[in-house]
Amino acid sequence: MHPYEPVPDLLRDRIVLVTGAADTLGRAVATACARHGATVVLSDLNQADLEPVYDAIEAEGCPQPAILPLDLEQCREPDFIAAADTLGAEFGRLDGLVHCAAFAPYLARIDDYDPAEWDRVLRVNLSAPFLLTQVCLPLLRAAPDASVVFTSDRVGRRGLAYWGAFAAAKFGCEGLMQTLAEELRDSSPIRVNSLDPGIVQSGLRARLYPGEDPKRWPTAEAVTAGYVYLLGPDARGVSGQALTADTAAPQ
């Protein structure tokens, strides 16, 4: 059994939007997509945080990326519609949408979870992915072989103590993925899946476990093959699946 190795031009000529592209996992996924030929639309809270990612991709000689700042906590429906209009005017379609943005302020008992933080976590991790996916559906339908990937988490498939709103949001994303996949199954070639990359070195992990040695976990770059697989033609026919980094791609 050999690990999946995408061919170098697997995503050539594809337009792929990646949220959370300034942070560890999103940056690694965006860079991997660019290295395999995609024109990547980098999205995160601040343009300034995305510019180093943009410059690094350009420096490698990959297709020129684009930047689309989105504040997932503050954006409302008109903001997402405006973002989709911008993508439509610039590219005319979207071949891939990858939800990598994630936010969790702390680990806490349900007894102690602040209601305002609960709303904030659900907004960033569930409501915003729903709204962004919804407004991008016409662009995804304009592509011949589009793919949506929701980044999942082990706590969104089996609840663990103290993960509170983040776990609830990830469970919600699994339900959203399954529902959308079923709705599109007989009417569209759009594929919709979730991918749990496992525990990786990330800003989120470091914030929640500040005393932990991050080197005990793999880097984000080590788990990108599953994302590239799901975005590319090798995954045609794969939809409605809750996958992991180890099982996403054929061995």
Image (spheres, rainbow, N blue to C red):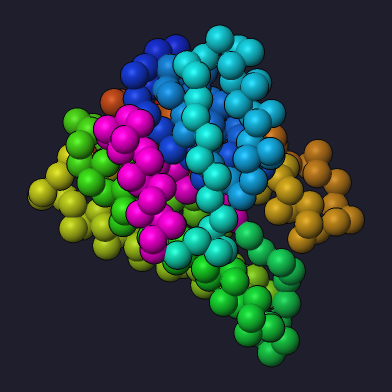
List x then y, in percent, for residue 43: 53, 42
Residue 92 as seen in the image, left or right of residue 98: left
Residue 93 as seen in the image, left or right of residue 209: left
Residue placed most toward the observer, 11 or 41? 41
Residue that protrudes farthest toward the right in the picture: 211
Question: What residue sits 46% from the left and 61% below the top?
Answer: 128
Residue that protrudes farthest toward the left in the picture: 186
List x then y, in percent, for residue 96: 36, 36
Name the image quarter holding the C terminus: top left
Residue placed most toward the observer, 170 or 84? 84
Residue 78, above or below 164: above
Residue 27, above or below 109: above
Magenta stretch holds residue 178: no
Q: Quadrant of residue 92?
A: top left
List x then y, in percent, for residue 223: 57, 35
Q: Quadrant of residue 55?
A: top right
Count of numbered marks: 0
Numbered range of the magenta stretch: 77-102
Question: What residue sits 43% from the left and 24% below the top?
Answer: 39
Question: What residue sits 60% from the left and 26% below the top?
Answer: 54
Q: Is residue 193 visible?
A: no
Q: Is residue 89 visible?
A: yes
Residue 112, above or below 238: below
Question: What residue sits 64% from the left and 46% below the top?
Answer: 46
Residue 193 as seen in the image, left or right of residue 44: left
List x then y, in percent, for residue 211: 89, 56
Residue placed most toward the observer, 186 or 51? 51
